[in-house]
Amino acid sequence: MRIWSAGAGTFLWHLSNNWGGAIGPEERAALIALYDATGGSDWTDDSNWLAGTGTECDWYGVTCDALGLTVTKLLLDSNALRGHIPPDIGNLLNLEVVCGRAVADHW
């Protein structure tokens, strides 16, 4: 973490991580667990899902914060999800919105 003074008691905080501007490994694992647990390969649209590290914010239905460091929304309604939401979803600590309509009654 770096702290810069902008004068008059104002500070700017710069948080850096070890994964180069991408979401963290726990968040990536949570998204992959969601994909696997809900039949991701059979979704209506699974564009970019499971692509390389650092691409998670480009996966269909995933929205990240402005810096691309954390997942804030999952918008996967009308996407033919089946199955259960895995407990790993709890690792998306900054998730504010989840929108999904499942085929089965497990949501």
Image (cartoon, rainbow, N blue to C red):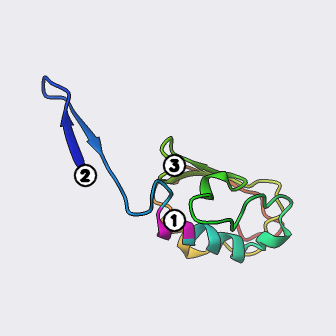
Mark 2 and mark 3 in contact (Cβ < 8 Å)? no
The alpha-carbon separation of the residues under discs 3 and 1 comes to 12 Å
Quick check: 77 left or right of 57?
Answer: right
Q: Main secondary structure of the magenta part?
A: helix
Q: Dot 1 corresponds to which residue?
A: 27
For badge 2, the amino acid type reads Met
Task: Of the two numbered discs 3 and 1 on the same chain, state the one appearing first in sequence.
Answer: 1
Asked if residue 52 shows in the view, the reply is yes
Disc sitting over residue 45 in the figure: none
For the point 83% across and 65% down, the residue is: 43
Disc sitting over residue 1 in the figure: 2
Q: Residue 26 in magenta? A: yes
For the point 78% across and 74% down, the residue is: 39
| Place of residue 16 in the rendered image (x, y in percent of width and height, measured from the top left) | 34, 53
Mark 2: secondary structure: loop
Q: Dot 3 corresponds to which residue?
A: 68
> Which of the two marks, 2 or 1, is nearer to us in this view?
2
Q: Which residues are magenta?
A: 24-28
For badge 1, the amino acid type reads Glu
| Quadrant in which the C terminus appears | bottom right
The alpha-carbon separation of the residues under discs 3 and 2 comes to 17 Å
Mark 3: secondary structure: loop
| Place of residue 68 in the rendered image (x, y in percent of width and height, measured from the top left) | 51, 49
For the point 72% across and 71% down, the residue is: 106
Q: Compared to 11, does 16 lie above or below?
A: below
* Pointer 1 local density, CA inside 10 Å: few below 14, some 14–19, many at least 20: many
Q: Compared to 102, does 6 lie above or below?
A: above
For badge 3, the amino acid type reads Gly
* Pointer 3 local density, CA inside 10 Å: few below 14, some 14–19, many at least 20: some
| Place of residue 9 in the rendered image (x, y in percent of width and height, measured from the top left) | 13, 28
